[in-house]
Amino acid sequence: MRRELSAMTSQPDHERLYIPGPVEVRREILDAQGQWMIGHRGKAFADLYGRLQPLLKESFGGGDQHRVYIYTSSGSGIWESASRCCVRDDQAALHLVNGAFSERWAGVTRENGKQVDAIEVPWGKAVRPEQVAEALSKKHYDMVAVVYCETSTGVLNPLPAIAEVVRQHPDTLLAVDVVSCWLGTEVEAAAWGLDIALTSSQKAFALPPGIAFGAVSDRVLERARQIPFRGYYFDVLTLEKHHEKNNTPATPPISLMFAAERQFRDIRAEGYAARYARHRRLAELTRAWAARQGFEMFSEEGYHSPTVSTIRNNRGIDFSAMQKFLAARGISLGGGYGKLKGETFRIAHMGDLQEAHLNELFAAMDAFLAQ
Ligand SMILES: Cc1ncc(COP(=O)(O)O)c(C=O)c1O
């Protein structure tokens, strides 16, 4: 297994991605997509769907009350699924906003005609469970929406503690975006009581983009039955009807499902715990590199993400010059996102990335900074 993962090291024919999605995809995973096509209403497809289900459930820490839907979209599609299916017309959603993605999801809920209140926290800081407790003590919310790993700021919110607070309000559903940390850190949908955990494929799963997964609880289906207009493509009740037959309402991304099955085989061979420990180690190495070079972290101490590091450009380096320098050496690095552009840059250390790959990046950045 280790040999397979490290085979990613020398692929001189392309730029290696250190951006927070899409991430570098191994040749074996790209090749797994090349299997002969199968019809999605046939037995071979139902078998494939059926084989993926326990793997997906395990990866989300899902229990008997969860199933994992396969969405033919990127992760943003499941934002819409959650917002439309969890919030009744006369009720509101509480969004926890501390970065560009959590802000956008709040916008999506509003654009779907739902009432939204937000707890806004300065970017770079984590949302505190006490803030959520206070908001929930004042008003009923049909859904609390939180982004576990804010990819723009590199903050990992204290999700287990937030979930504990929300669970004290039995009619409030908890929808969680785990897009940029699922399979890079523990997600325990059953133990933490998550009603929706939603993700994309192109982050720590290290698949190409175009397929998304949502672990959805029975409670969401019960809520959806009380909401008359949920749309079609992202409606959980429509998805459920087909899920029961190991199928999807519309044509699924079959090639990506082949790749997903192959990737799960490798992930299980590495071991979930080992995979998460590797991500934490890569994050530590990145923070150590930043400190060595005199950079500060943008994310608050104690809440650094294990999958993406957002680094403050306190040295005032010409980041686009560094990006060009790195690109000439086959490396693609991510800048600051949204309003943090210029002020920060981001190093993604997720997926199948190994320490050796990070060291190559550090060496190249050191060479740029030594000029
Ligand atoms: C935390 C988070 N949520 C949602 C998204 C949107 O996901 P997608 O681009 O797969 O729709 C992203 C994309 O980077 C993200 O980082």
Image: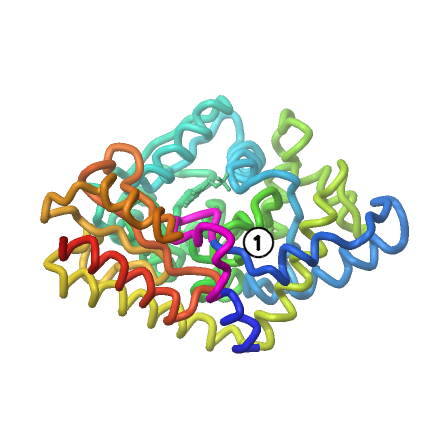
Q: Residue at x 35, y 48 (%)?
A: 328
Verify whether residue 18 appears in magenta: yes
For badge 1, the amino acid type reads Leu
Whether residue 106 sits left or right of residue 85 in the image: it is left
As displayed, is residue 76 above or below residue 364? above
Q: Nearer the viewer, residue 148 or 363?
A: 363
Q: Position of residue 40 (x, y in %)?
A: 83, 45
Quadrant (top left, top right, bottom left, bottom right) of the N terminus: bottom right
Q: Position of residue 28 (x, y in %)?
A: 63, 62
Whether residue 370 sits left or right of residue 279 in the image: it is left
Name the secondary structure under disc 1. loop
Whether residue 332 sits left or right of residue 363 in the image: it is right
Colour mapping used in the image: rainbow
Q: Residue at x 70, y 44 (%)?
A: 253
Q: Main secondary structure of the magenta part?
A: loop
Report the residue marked by disc 1. 207
Ligand 1, seen in the image, is in the quarter at: top left
Q: Residue at x 26, y 51 (%)?
A: 310
Quadrant assignment, res 348: bottom left
Q: Nearer the viewer, residue 186 or 128?
A: 186
Q: Residue at x 54, y 77 (%)?
A: 3
State whether label 1 is within 8 Å of ligand 1: no
Whether residue 4 sits left or right of residue 302 in the image: it is right
Verify whether residue 342 appears in magenta: no
Question: The magenta stretch spans which residues?
Answer: 9-23
> Is any atom of residue 41 visible in this view?
yes
